[in-house]
Image: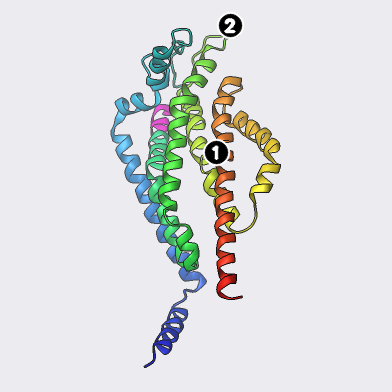
């Protein structure tokens, strides 16, 4: 049998194996189930850690010996600062248990993100063309690194300044926030930062499919800067310093995205020029 015929047979066999809509749903369900199991496993480990683990992670920015405060004080005594002392309270019955459960779930989502994204990638990868698969090689690793970097940035940079500002803002009332309120704010300082740090990957794929170009990104620099400041104001407290702490890295990522978009366009143009030479 000729090699061409073998290739045709293989192609027809692969077409015959295309899944139906219900089969796709079933496959998606199992990807979601496995992702959920990963989140639960990490969450259970965080929950088992109990009060000590919760105190180490969540209460870190409340303590004067937190790494960020020590680093800034070691750089310059004039810049040295630390959060005011304040106590957390549980104002509802069972609130501490619910907060601990939510904390464990958040840790599970954060630690399980690389696996969740890998499962998502496994689901969409079979539907991509070979050149698309090649272009997206390493996307799971890159997205995971960006997400973790964003979360760590939010935890070690944004959180200390935000906690210090909010805890030190005083109108004469006794500052005793609820433990659920504190955890909600800590979540807002970290997880959204992990998501918005995915901007270069988003721009990469939007450029690949032709929705954005480097010239488009350059022409809307000022607009992007305003949008970034608005976004920073949404995900951070009404503190100018904290807003700039999250806004400046986001604008830096926007500039990095322009460079990435340029490289994508340059590769596409080079490929098209090569194809024209081969097939004039």
Q: Residues within 10 Å of mark 2 (few under 14, many from 20)?
A: few
Q: Secondary structure at mark 1?
A: helix
Residue 37 is marked as none
Look at the picture and state if 70 lies above or below 222: above
* Of marks 1 and 2, the one in the foreground: 1
Horizontal arrangement in the rendering, residue 38 relative to residue 247 (left or right): left
Kindly identify which residue carries mark 1: 253
What stretch of residues is rendered in magenta?
Answer: 94-100
* Image spot of residue 89 (x, y percent): 44, 18
Q: Secondary structure at mark 2?
A: loop
The quadrant in which the N terminus is found is: bottom left
Q: Residues within 10 Å of mark 1 (few under 14, many from 20)?
A: some
Can residue 8 be seen at all in this image of the molecule? yes
Given residues 243 and 222, the one toward you in this image is 222
Given residues 54 and 91, the one toward you in this image is 54
Name the magenta segment's main secondary structure. helix
The residues tagged by marks 1 and 2 sit, at their Cα atoms, a distance apart of 40 Å
Given residues 263 and 99, the one toward you in this image is 263
The quadrant in which the C terminus is found is: bottom right
The quadrant where residue 269 appears: bottom right
Q: Is residue 169 magenta?
A: no
The quadrant where residue 236 appears: top right
* Image spot of residue 266 (x, y percent): 57, 55
> Which of disc 2 and disc 1 is earlier in sequence?
2
Horizontal arrangement in the rendering, residue 66 relative to residue 231 (left or right): left
Can residue 93 be seen at all in this image of the molecule? no
Look at the picture and state if 94 lies above or below 259: above
The quadrant where residue 13 appears: bottom left
* Image spot of residue 175 (x, y percent): 51, 12
Residue that appears at 43% across and 14% down:
87
Residue that appears at 42% across and 45% down:
144
Residue 172 is marked as 2
């Amino acid at each position: 049998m000729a090699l061409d015929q073998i290739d045709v047979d293989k192609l027809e066999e692969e077409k015959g194996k295309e899944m139906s809509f219900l089969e796709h749903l079933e496959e998606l369900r199992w990807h979601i189930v496995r992702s959920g199991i990963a989140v639960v496993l990490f969450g259970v480990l965080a929950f088992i850690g109990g009060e000590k683990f919760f105190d180490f992670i969540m209460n870190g920015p409340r303590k004067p010996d937190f790494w960020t405060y020590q680093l800034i004080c070691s750089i310059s005594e004039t810049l040295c600062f630390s959060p005011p002392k304040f106590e957390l309270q549980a104002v509802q019955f069972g609130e501490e248990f619910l907060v601990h459960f939510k904390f464990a779930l958040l840790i599970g989502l954060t630690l399980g993100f690389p696996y969740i994204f890998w499962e998502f990638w496994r689901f969409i990868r079979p539907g991509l063309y070979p050149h698309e698969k090649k272009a997206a090689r390493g996307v799971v690793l890159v997205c995971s690194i960006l997400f973790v970097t964003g979360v760590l940035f939010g935890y070690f940079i944004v959180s200390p300044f935000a906690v210090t500002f909010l805890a030190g803002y005083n109108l004469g009332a006794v500052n005793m926030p609820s433990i659920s309120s504190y955890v909600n704010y800590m979540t807002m300082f970290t997880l959204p930062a992990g998501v918005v740090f995915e901007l270069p990957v988003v721009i990469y794929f939007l450029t690949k499919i032709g929705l954005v170009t480097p010239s488009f990104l350059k022409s809307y620099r000022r607009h992007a800067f305003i949008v970034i400041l608005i976004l920073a104001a949404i995900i951070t407290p009404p503190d100018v310093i904290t807003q700039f702490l999250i806004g400046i890295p986001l604008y830096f990522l926007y500039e990095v995205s322009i460079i990435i978009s340029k490289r994508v366009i340059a590769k596409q143009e080079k490929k098209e020029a090569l194809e024209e030479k081969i097939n004039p």
